[in-house]
Image: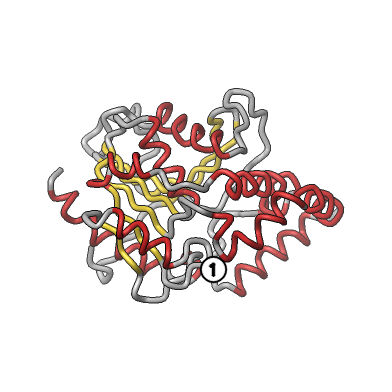
Amino acid sequence: MDSELKEEIPVHEEFILCGGAETQVLKCGPWTDLFHDRSVKRPKLLIFIIPGERKSLDSNAQEIKDIYGLNGQIEHKLAFLRTHVPKDMKLVLIGHSIGSYFTLQMLKRVPELPVIRAFLLFPTIERMSESPNGRIATPLLCWFRYVLYVTGYLLLKPCPETIKSLLIRRGLQVMNLENEFSPLNILEPFCLANAAYLGGQEMMEVVKRDDETIKEHLCKLTFYYGTIDPWCPKEYYEDIKKDFPEGDIRLCEKNIPHAFITHFNQEMADMIADSLKDDLSKM
């Protein structure tokens, strides 16, 4: 994909009920309903992005047990594919951070998914609590989680929506990010509590790398590790590269940080687009 040839791609936001939870979906492209659109313009391929940042909205989460936990989030992504994507639709999965763990688990639980390529970007798929950031996050999320709940509730619950909106806009301006869609929910106490709850489970449960699943799907996996990533240090790259020398396992040479979306989103998009050329040419 030539980065100089830019065309306007429509992006729209939807809120759907998936697995009992109200779910924010950002759709890129001219499509809105893959199931009922039988026109020639219906895409042959869906690129399904599973971000590392979790944004949980208020819900009556009855259909998927513990939907804000690690297992529930994996089932939530599978539920979306079952209910909103035709079974014969080819898939490209892009997982970032804990989204990479979700991606591997999705392949493990539903190996018949028509995935032609899965990108695992800065993948937190093992030893999270042992990583530099994990050593800090583990006591906060596992031992002092309820202190965070109470503090967040006391500080944010009485805070007017206008103040929250101002804080978010100011934060986005500092990071030079465009606010195309409203992220107001990130300062809601229940949203922060859900994120802390999931984070605590990540620290406790994402320990051993799932080599069996990686081996089974290695031909369709692309790993991308960072050199300055405090969540999955270079040591993790060296270990997996040694165990799977034939795999497509890359080490970033541009010092791109774990949270690349803030300033390096175009570089990552170009890398993925270039990597997909061979796969797309075979369709």
Asked which quadrant contains residue 3, the reply is: bottom left
Q: Nearer the viewer, residue 146 or 35?
A: 146
Residue at figure coordinates x 65%, y 69% from the top left? 171
Q: Residue 115 placed where, x, y %?
A: 28, 39
Which image quadrant for residue 22? Answer: top right
Q: Is residue 265 above or below residue 82?
A: below
Q: Would you say 115 lies left or right of 56 here?
A: left
- Which colour assignment does the render follow? secondary structure
The image shows residue 168, relative to residue 86, as above or below, that is below
Q: Secondary structure at mark 1?
A: loop
Q: In the picture provided, is 253 more to the left or to the right than 18? A: left
Figure label count: 1
Q: Nearer the viewer, residue 235 or 214?
A: 235
- Residue located 78% across and 62% down the image: 163
In the image, residue 269 lies at what x, y percent? Answer: 34, 62
Asked if residue 245 shows in the view, the reply is yes
Name the residue type under label 1: Leu
The extreme top residue here reads 63
Q: Please identify the quadrant where the N terminus is shown.
A: bottom left
Callout 1 environment at 10 Å: few (<14), some (14 to 19), or many (20+)?
Answer: some
Q: Residue beneath label 1, please?
A: 177
Question: Does residue 42 appear in the picture of this structure?
Answer: no
Q: x, y (%) of residue 103?
A: 41, 43
Q: Residue at x 61, y 75 (%)?
A: 174
Relative to residue 92, is residue 13 drawn left or right? right
Quadrant where the image shows the C terminus: top left
Where residue 170 sits, quadrant-wise, is: bottom right
Q: Nearer the viewer, residue 210 or 13?
A: 210
